[in-house]
Image (spheres, rainbow, N blue to C red):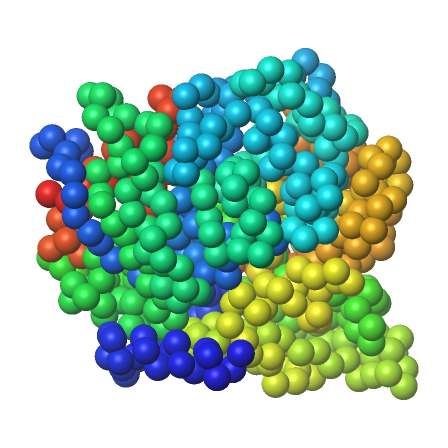
Amino acid sequence: MKQRGISVRSRMVKRFGAVAAVSLVGSLFVASGSQAAERPSATPKYGGEITMLIDGNIAGHCFANALPGGPLGASRSIYESLFERSSTGKYVGYLAKSATSTDNKVWTIALREGIKFSNGEEFNATVVKQNIDIGRGALVPSRTYASTGIGVNANILTVDVVDNLTVKVTLDRPDNDFLGLMYRAGRYVMRAPAQIAGTANCSTNPIGTGPFMLQSFKPDEQIVVRNPNYWRKDAAGRQLPYLDKITFLVVKEASQRAAAVRTGRGDAAFFVQGDATFTQDLAKRKSAVTGYKSTQTAWGQWMPNVNKAGSPFKFRNCRLAAAYSMDWNSYNKVRLRGTGNYSGSIVGKDHPMFTLKGAPKYDLKKARTYLQRCNTELGTAGPMRVTLYADSSTQSQNNTRFIQKSMEKAGILVNDPFIGESALLVSKIYKGGGNDFDFAQGTPAEGATPGYVFPFFVSKAFPLTSTNPIKDTLLGKGYNTVIALGNHSDDKVDELIYGAQAELNPAKAKKKWQAATAYLQDQGYAIPAVHGGFQVFVNNNAKLRGIGTLKMPSGDKAEIVETKGFEWTGVWKG
């Protein structure tokens, strides 16, 4: 693994040149803001090839492959989901036309007709049932495809085919944000039966309904070409997409990505908030590049791993010592150049779960007081000592060093960090038996609603009251806690969160969500960190047009930059 990583990195340096710049922050935090789409201009042209630079290796395209932003964008050029999030934050149908329910417990999903996968297979209710059932661990292939989806989907009791274009999903308990969970920050995609049947190469043979289809795949380079079976047309009735080919190329170092897109060696490049040094420089170079930002819907939290063997975080005093030692305002100012957002809560101020109740904030005096109590409780197992981790990129390692120094000022002992490629880190964080590390550093809790936020906080995906038969299977037991990255066993958290999820009255639900947040913060189960989004820069000489102008099938306007980066369906070369 280490030798291959060196080889890939060497190829990237040779191709783009070694840039003598040091990134200041890591890829675990992301950028913010929004930008208006360009105005529609001339008639779109067909043809053209572009190169999109992304920030991390593409681990694969099957159920178990959890992809971060840049790699997710490469995958999402091939795949589509039942629902998407509009620019106003509401969830709307995409492959699905609608989802309706009278009690938030039984949901009827109506699908669009006339859709085919890139290999010609029909997209229908049977395919949707297969995808959801495998993802939740209800079909035999799920052993091969076991993933965190088993925990995320633990509230789904049954999936029934009503007719060719209608699916009925019955939940164990009501869910007032079911569509937010089904969207899952763009990760709930539909795979073709042929891909699913190929268990040996499911990860490397993606087949979706999206605008592009796979030509070649390597973890550091994926090439997609126009899907001749794509189902969408533009407003004038022209077949989509317009582009012939996109090459997604992994360039780990933000400095190299920035230099490449600035000089035209890459047509576009994806950045996270940790790349602020370079994105701020690019923003000043308006004659060379144009930048596009996402809204801030990626919530940063650090979660102490409570029940890891030998972890000091089984004690609340140890968790709070860490929480009060982290200087996120300085991190935002120094490392992110003020581009991030520190709300003081585990979510942003506009989120239904937002509250400052119980929230710790940087205070060295309090951190040292809690550390003293922590070390007393640890006894001979003390003093408190932790290990952080970082991606192999320079910016991620510098990010980790900043937090390490902040903790050390309070007297906390910190070992040398574990360094690994992002795909390796993901595999060690989301695994049967729980997170390998002392923290989950910057969890992927995303979205303007609780749907893809709360699964990371509960102690059990299948609560004590669950009637889901999957709960008692090997997969159910193995993934009951894997999504709960803090690995705590506090039933009160589950009681508060699942109670809020099931509340039918919106005003009462909001109060219950806030009560859950207050408890998580007070107990130190989730430590508020910097929030943000993502950013894409395009070289002006690439003459990319139509960015952000194509509306979704529902007629709603989409975000220009999402978790997955650009929506390439309506982009063309002028």
State left or right for residue 528 relative to residue 225.
Answer: right
Residue 339, position as x, y percentages in the image: 39, 58
Q: Residue at x 44, y 65 (%)?
A: 219
Q: Residue at x 50, y 52 (%)?
A: 61
Quadrant holding the C terminus: top left
Residue 352, position as x, y percentages in the image: 61, 35
Residue 79, position as x, y percentages in the image: 44, 41
Residue 44, quarter of picture: top left
- Vertical order, 299 against 469 (above or below): below
Between 326 and 103, the one nearer to me in the picture = 103
Q: Residue at x 29, y 72 (%)?
A: 256
Observer able to see residue 357: no
Residue 295, quarter of picture: top left
State left or right for residue 543 relative to residue 242.
Answer: left
Between 115 and 573, the one nearer to me in the picture = 115
Q: Residue at x 22, y 54 (%)?
A: 50
Residue 539, position as x, y percentages in the image: 18, 56
- Vertical order, 215 against 424 (above or below): above
